[in-house]
Amino acid sequence: MLKSHKNLLEPRPSDRLRIGERIVDIPLREIAPAAGGDAVRVTLKSLSVLLALVANANKLVSREALLEWVWPDTLPTDDVVTQAITQLRKALGDDRDRPRYIETLAKQGYRLVAPVEWLVDEAQPSALPAPAAAPGSRRWLWPVFALASAVTVFVLWQGRDAPAAPEDVVAANTRSVSLPDYQRIASSPVSEQRPSLSPDGALVVYIRNSENDEYAQLMLQTASAASPKPLTEAVPKQFDLSPAWSPDGRQIAFVRASSERCALMLIPVTGGSARELGECLGGNGHPIRWYPDSKALVAAGKPQQASGAAATLTLYRMSLDEGRWRRIPYEKAPTDEDLAPQVSPDGRWIAFQRNLSLGDLWRIPVGGGAPQRLTELRTNFYGLVWTPDSRHLLFSRYVDGKVGLSKLDTDTGRITDFIGDENSLMYPSVAKNTGMVAFEVENTRSRMRRVALAGGSEAVYGSERLFDSSGSNLLPSVAPDGSQLLFFSDRSGDPRLWWVDQRQPDSLRSFDGLMPVPRYPPMWRADSQRALVIGRRTGDAADSVYEVEPGPGRATKLPVPDGQPVHVAYHPDPNRLLVTADRGEGRLGVTLYDRSRQPWRALATVDNAAIAIPDVRNRRIVLATMSQHEIRSTDLDLNGPRSIDRANIPRRNRALAVTPEGVRVMDSAPGCYWQWRLVAVEGSDRDARCLGEIGWHLEGVTASPDGSILYVSVVEEMQSDIGLAPLPAFADEAR
């Protein structure tokens, strides 16, 4: 009987093995030709299936046994095994009908028929045959990522004036290692989030959400799988958030939010009554963190008197004695969004994230001054913390289809990605005295819905799921013909671009080998024959613009001059493209290119714009900013940008679409969880159609050509637990 996927062949001769003419690197999850060539990365589940077959080489392994091994605690469909086997055959260069690696035995299972050899270092004994499955072994199978972008990336698969470093330089300064085993210390049926460890690592405080999301309270428990106790009361419509354990171990700061107000609170670790320190900063500037002397707090936000759309997040300090937020004096541009500040344990530095979807890590001296850029990642971050040595930063980011933990050496710039499992590992917290790290373990699932709208301002008259699977489906884009859909999904195990003609449901297929960046949806050409998407193939040094043709299934890389494209769209002129790219330090701008000649010629540029969408009917280009939450428009040549709406657009501008009525945005309103709102443009009624509670977090929306049908991706399943692991060793930084 095969054991759980958490029981990897113990002991294992090495991390590499040869199967036939392929080399398998277990920590990296890569399969490469032994004679040399491009490696193919497989998913954790596919690798688990392969190792199960290796452990039972030349023996029949039933589908039931594989399900028990790889999916022990879930109720998967049989097709997950088929998907894993299909991916393995592609990576191995195998043929189902003439198998050289994996043989299918009809209605029985699978058998690995290729010779297996473990590859060991010269200092170790010579290669050994693959061992049989070891009964009772208890070693985690951990070759994975670890989030990105985009929790949510996929969070869901999960949205920060020096010249940008070349992507290949960044890659050369990055390595991957296995993460030590972790245990889930809190795993109730509801979600537990944002852990904060006590300085001695013995206790952890975290947020527990109610089942119906009516409230959130703080829970306290030992750093083990023990029963927690409430630290704050469960009060309807009250949400206790962002707990932060003081460095002296005596108290916990947190945010208490309600529909009426938001306050900064302090409570003893022994419990009791919480006292209010002052009001929160504007702009949802969580989290709050401590200075090492436990006498002051640091946070990002907007001052309450400047909380309008034009203000950006800035770093502030509050002394407990004074109870007042004061801006930290440092240099920043008006459009910079600075968030998630963390003071180093030695009290010398404040590290923070600058900007959102193209974010990087920066630091300033603790008293303020000129910021120093620490990374050239241009990514989304999901938590940031100093390690006890004040040299390293531990953070979460989107890598290879998941959110995982990474470590930065602030002296050398070396980044280490810690390979974990298929879950997203987010928002780390480090115990300063013991070297333990707690983090949020998140598993989310996004589903796509087709929503039919009633006439007038009435709500919805129909909503149905589309192309449901065991994975996440997000960022849909409907073609101008109203039938074709492109969307992103990890339904096959790894993130891919999928296409379907709704008139032919069996037409669903993916663009193999192209990993899309799940930041914005694909953009269709007016004739519905082609579309544009940001992504990369194996061997790409950086994200690139690809033009896909669903008919023949081709994907062609375009020679876009911008080295870091973020969004791309067709212009009404077929010889022109609109490309949004990083214009330095995570600041976005849109450039109009003439691609009728080589190299492409830049015709015009608009700064501070995250996306550009043509509105052909009204002969204009619609722009959305990232930092100031503003919708603007220009003429077709990008002249004369002007504001048409101030809107706090959720999910990094994924909620915006051009319809026959004008520009619409998905947002919330009192009494309506999700509404489809017409923005304030000349001659409009600014109507809003309530869609109700169709899901939690929005992951994309697109409208049919006549505006009567919406295709919406929302998070419908979200579960997060608290994980705990030893802090990975940071020795031998030169490796």
Image (cartoon, helix red, strand yellow):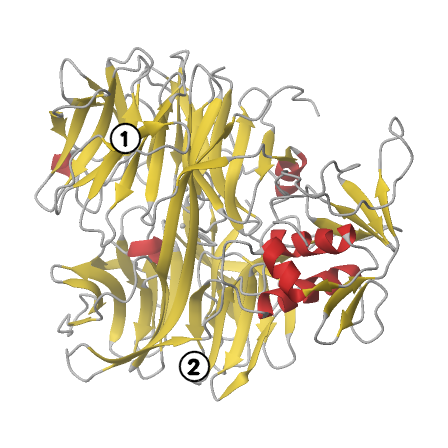
Residue 480, numbered label: 2
Q: Nearer the viewer, residue 469 or 308?
A: 469
Q: Quadrant of residue 283?
A: top left
SS of the residue under disc 2: loop
| In the image, farthest residue toward the left | 260
Q: Is residue 489 above or below residue 565?
A: below
The residue at 72%/61% (across/down) is 88
Q: Is any part of residue 304 visible from this angle? A: yes
SS of the residue under disc 1: strand
- Residue 656, image x and y in percent? 32, 64
The residue at 32%/72% (across/down) is 658
Residue 267, numbered label: none
Compared across the picture, whether 578 is left or right of 318 comes to right
- Tell me the residue that label 1 is attached to: 243
| In the image, farthest residue toward the bottom | 503
Q: Is residue 661 above or below residue 128?
A: below
- Residue 95, image x and y in percent? 80, 71
- Residue 324, image x and y in percent? 14, 22
**How many C-alpha atoms fall within 10 Å of the one at disc 2: few (<14), some, or many (≥20)?**
some
Q: Quadrant of residue 718?
A: bottom left
The residue at 48%/57% (across/down) is 518
Compared across the picture, whether 85 is left or right of 120 comes to left
Compared across the picture, whether 447 is left or right of 563 comes to left
Could you tell me the amino acid type at mark 1?
A: Pro
The residue at 49%/41% (across/down) is 397
* Upstream in sequence: badge 2 or badge 1: 1
Cα–Cα gap, marks 2 and 1:
47 Å
Foreground: disc 2 or disc 1: 1
